[in-house]
Image (cartoon, rainbow, N blue to C red):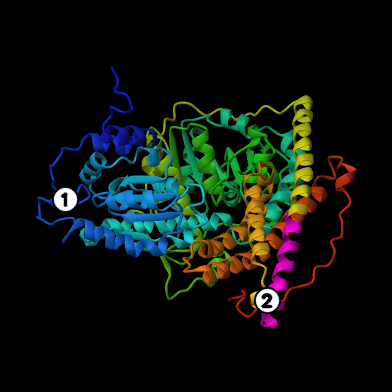
Amino acid sequence: MENTEEQKSVFEKNMEALYAIDPLTTSLLQKVTANEKFEIFISSDPANINFVNKENFKPLFVTNPVNETMKTMQELSAYALYPHLYFFGLGNGVLYRLLLNNNEALEHLVIIEPEAEILYNVFHFFDFSEEIKTRRVEFHIAANVNKIVVEYIFGFKTSSVYSKLYDLRLFNSYYGAYRDEYLRINKLFTEVIESVIISYGNDSNDSVIGLKHLLLNVPEMLQNPSYQEFVKKAQNTSTAIIVSTGPSLYKQLPLLKEVAPYVTIFCIDASFPILTQAGIKPDIVLTLERVEESAKFYTDTPLEAQDGVIFAITAIAHKKTLNAITRGQKILPMRPFPYTFYLKLEEYGYVGIGMSAANMAYEAIRHSDFSSIVFIGQDLAFGADGTSHSKGAVYGEREVIKEIVKQDKKDPIMLEAYGGGRMVESTYVWRLFLKFFELDIAKTPPNIDVINATEGGARIHGANEHSFKEVVDAIDKSQVKKPIILKEPTEKEYEVNKEKITKRIESILHHGNIQKAKVEKIFLDICSMTEELERLNKEQQLEKINFKKMDRLVDKINAAKNNFIKNKHMRIFDNIVQSYMMHQEMELAKISTRMVNGDIEEKARKIDWIYAHKYWFFSLAGGIDTVLEVIKDSVKEWMDIPEQYLTKEIPTPIKSSIVTEDGVLHI
């Protein structure tokens, strides 16, 4: 007979809640032997709990545990408005029970504990089950923390918004003994935060161009086979080889030519001309970029080289790139962006979450269930002779992206070399490519063999390292592969999908115009308030500020923001405005978490909040307007736009406010 909820012990409740969220940590705790490494001491005060390490006789708390905990609570009072807190070390659990009980602003508490036995002990003393279920608190064993775990942690609601406030706090001096583990995990956190921020971008123009290209390409996308059709048919052998364009590629070409009939070759666009010159026909060629320069990889290759090849070109590609491919078969898969999800054509997506065509190739291979994935030419670093690309590369062996030219040679980016034992020079962008590979490999099922046969460049952690000759020798050459032939959509299927997208676009225009009007109204209200504040400040009559009116405006600002965030129809605008809105949100987080003492400081914070949102609403209104105009301009060739969306009202000119020197009005 099962225990009722009342009959369950604290430990059972915690374990049951944890199992639903994190089975791995639960399994580790089930294997813990009580009092194996730590002796527990409890006084008459149930909060006065101390653990002593039996190996070195060091106590968790040097003095009175309650006094030390209350001192830490006092130190943390400055962070009372922080929604996210991160700690290394669980201690006796009292601190975290107090934080969760007394801090209403705390939405997400993350605790990394190096000793499973300590977590096991604390789970017997305090009930965290309800907070575990809602992820208000997360417990992780340090040894299990990797990039995937940290990505999961930062997948929590507003984690990314408050990422600039991140700090991994050491619980107390006892945990200094785990310095190396602390540094490793802190580095993982900072790397993931960096990737999160970069994923939002810093140039909204790229997103606008991507949306424009996608909408221009809709007819061609729908007339060609879907990505899901490709995934079903792509596996014509058990081994997929990703051919990139690093300096090491050229030496691998003879072996690749030898094994080409027996493996499936996924070739990035820049490698296509090189393979053609070597007499090697790839099965799939991939293009990720939206720039027109990608067309050169196809225009500089003989037309007959396209015969029998599948070209996986992302739907945001430039028209010149698509027009350069006139043979073989094309598919135009959508990348996983908010505006592509909104179109609700899942069969044509989603691939290309990474930052390079090779990252895209890896995703496509994983979706297609190959048994082995092999990298060649994936150097992600400069060659010993300073080259950045393979011999025969269209843009030259020393082709460099702008970022490399700007790279500080006094502090070069160094990565562990293929084979280990030394370091190689890389770039900021290549390092990002590498991170995406390592994250993808970590998510790859263990039955898929991932091999880095580049024999040069940087080490890709998670991939097994073998020479390409070893790989080629192990390939089954008893049967030549069959060509991959994809089924083309029928005219009826094309019309049905086109109608789906047409309705979605009409919905975007409808809801976008409604939201834009609301945002512009809030912006005008903010302008009116800030002009009034500046007038009173100039006239030295701050005592006449109407704080009730100001409070109503703050409530209106917060309500409008929540409406935008929760409105599912606004997701389409996310990818366009997020690059600058997210960075503004990170700055706003500093205001919202700022502790104030007394009514005057609270009023000053509200004024800062209003001023900070002036540009926020201005940016949002401009972003929505940009998206609406791009949509109308891009779809006019293949759909009829309803009349009410064709005219664009000219807004009344808004008088610019004179902002004080530091951008805010301080009382």
Q: Is residue 1 visible?
A: yes
User: Relative to the observer, which residue lies in front, 94 or 613?
Assistant: 94
Tell me if residue 479 comes above or below residue 326 in the rendering. above
Taking the image as shown, residue 622 lies to the left or right of residue 91, namely right
Location of mark 1 (residue):
51
Q: Which mark is residue 659?
A: 2
Determine the residue located farthest toward the top in the rendered image: 1
Q: Residue at x 64, y 34 (%)?
A: 346
Q: Residues within 10 Å of mark 2 (few under 14, many from 20)?
A: few
Span of residues in magenta: 519-541
User: Relative to the observer, which residue lies in front, 457 or 250?
Assistant: 457
Q: Residue at x 57, y 55 (%)?
A: 200
What type is the residue that disc 2 sits on?
Val
- 521 in magenta: yes
Q: Which mark is residue 306?
A: none
Q: Quadrant of residue 451?
A: top left
Q: Quadrant of residue 492?
A: top right
Taking the image as shown, residue 191 lies to the left or right of residue 482, namely left
